[in-house]
Image (cartoon, helix red, strand yellow):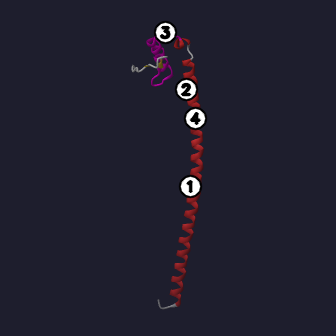
């Protein structure tokens, strides 16, 4: 570099490149911070909505199970465990659950999937 003109052009060019890199780095940091905050807020909102949905589903299922448990024929000790399992099998089909079990006063379990303990 022999002339002042060339030195000045190179110096200004390097200065412009350094300023551009600094602005890009600042923009990247700022954008990533905003993106993280927005994502965190959105995920919290989605989690709240999902928990409300799950809660209402569980509440509805619990009401349905309580209604089944309150049936007179299931509470009647004169009805055999096999008949109670048959009643529960019908309820399993109706509400679409996997299985139900009747547990007698002795602690024996009689399940709709055929397994008893």
Label 3, residues with CA under 10 Å away: few <14, some 14-19, many ≥20:
few
* Direction left: furthest residue: 115
Residue that mark 1 sits on: 36
* Earlier residue among tags 3 and 2: 2
In the image, residue 68 above or below residue 5: above
Magenta span contains residue 100: yes
In the image, residue 72 above or below residue 52: above
- Span of residues in magenta: 76-101
Q: What is the CA distance from the residue labelled 3 to the residue labelled 1?
A: 61 Å
* Earlier residue among tags 3 and 4: 4
Residue that mark 3 sits on: 79
User: Which structural element holds mark 2?
Assistant: helix
Residue that mark 2 sits on: 61
Q: What is the CA distance from the residue labelled 3 to the residue labelled 2?
A: 25 Å
Residue that mark 4 sits on: 53
Of discs 4 and 2, which sits in the foreground? 2
* Earlier residue among tags 3 and 1: 1
In the image, residue 25 above or below residue 16: above
Q: Is residue 81 left or right of residue 44?
A: left
Pointer 3 and pointer 4: residues touching (CB < 8 Å)? Answer: no
* Earlier residue among tags 4 and 1: 1
Question: How many circles with numbers are drawn on the protein?
Answer: 4
Magenta span contains residue 69: no
């Amino acid at each position: 570099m022999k002339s002042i003109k060339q030195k000045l052009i190179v110096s200004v060019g390097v200065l412009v490149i350094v300023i551009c890199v600094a602005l890009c780095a600042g923009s990247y940091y700022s954008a990533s911070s905003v993106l993280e905050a927005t994502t965190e807020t959105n995920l919290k909102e989605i989690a709240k909505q999902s928990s409300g949905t799950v809660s209402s589903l569980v509440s509805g299922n619990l009401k349905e199970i309580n209604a089944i448990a309150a049936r007179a024929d299931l509470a009647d000790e004169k009805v055999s465990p096999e008949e109670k399992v048959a009643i529960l099998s019908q309820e399993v089909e109706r509400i679409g659950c996997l299985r139900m079990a009747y547990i007698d006063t002795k602690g024996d379990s009689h399940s709709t999937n055929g397994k008893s303990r």
